[in-house]
Amino acid sequence: MNLLENQAREEICRVGRSLFERGLVHATAGNVSVRLDDGFLITPTDACLGFLDPARLAKLDLQGQQVSGDKGSKTIALHRQIYDAACEHSPHTSCVIHTHSTHCVALSLNAHGPELLPPITPYFVMKVGHVPLARYHRPGSPDAAREVAALIRQHAAKGTPIRAVMLPRLGPNVWHDSPAAAMATLEELEETARLMLLQPDTPPLLANDLDDLRQTFGARW
């Protein structure tokens, strides 16, 4: 086990504990993975993210086959599809986080549009961007993994790469270049969902506001 893998194990546990202590995950819901040169690390199935052991994280090879550790979460199939699709335009993508965050899930229960949220705050536009709403699939469904990968590629082709997809009634999947960056994306997404539930009639930012964010900060909206 090399230094980078050891650091990744520690960081997964740090992020999991932080998410749990702040109520962004609960019970045994949610999972975190990191892409390595020789495979993947992922939280074990039915593990509480608040009490992870670095040595017991599941290690899988590049084909998703278990190498060591406790049995990996079944969502590795979805995570691998996300890595494959996201790395086509963002090759440094190295962490995926899935949670059942309360406000995101609550907002999805009655959502009917192609996206979970309109662009209501500048930081949501800058730090998260578009969050397409997938169709409902049961947990672990291979159809969900294929649909998420397709949504990633569709948005990249339009010049608006995404960092999150919402699974209705389940929760968001977010990804970024590190566990810390992926966690920050998740936090901004969940906070924006909370704001939308508190103020459901909030109008979106105007077109010229969005253009200003694109030109000034490179926002991908």
Image (cartoon, rainbow, N blue to C red):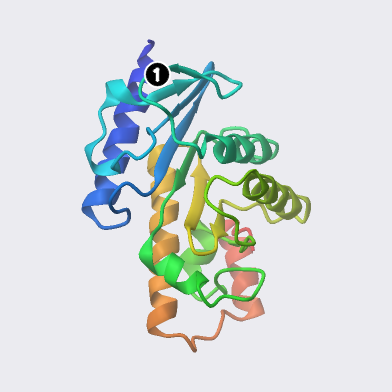
Q: Residues within 10 Å of mark 1 (few under 14, many from 20)?
A: few
Q: Quadrant of residue 106?
A: bottom left
**Does 135 sit above or below residue 51?**
below
Label 1 sits on residue:
4
**Does 28 sit above or below residue 167?**
above
Residue 154 at x, y percent in the picture = 75, 53
User: Which is more toward the observer, 171 or 21?
Assistant: 171
Residue 192 at x, y percent in the picture = 43, 69
Q: Residue at x 24, y 43 (%)?
A: 50
Residue 47 at x, y percent in the picture = 31, 38
User: Which is more toward the observer, 163 or 206?
Assistant: 163
> Amino acid type of disc 1?
Leu
Residue furthest to the front = 138
Q: Is residue 126 visible?
A: yes
Q: Residue at x 77, y 56 (%)?
A: 158
Q: Residue at x 70, y 36 (%)?
A: 88
Q: Is residue 192 visible?
A: no
User: Which is more toward the observer, 138 or 194?
Assistant: 138
Residue 122 at x, y percent in the picture = 49, 69
Quarter containing the C terminus: bottom right
Q: Secondary structure at mark 1?
A: helix
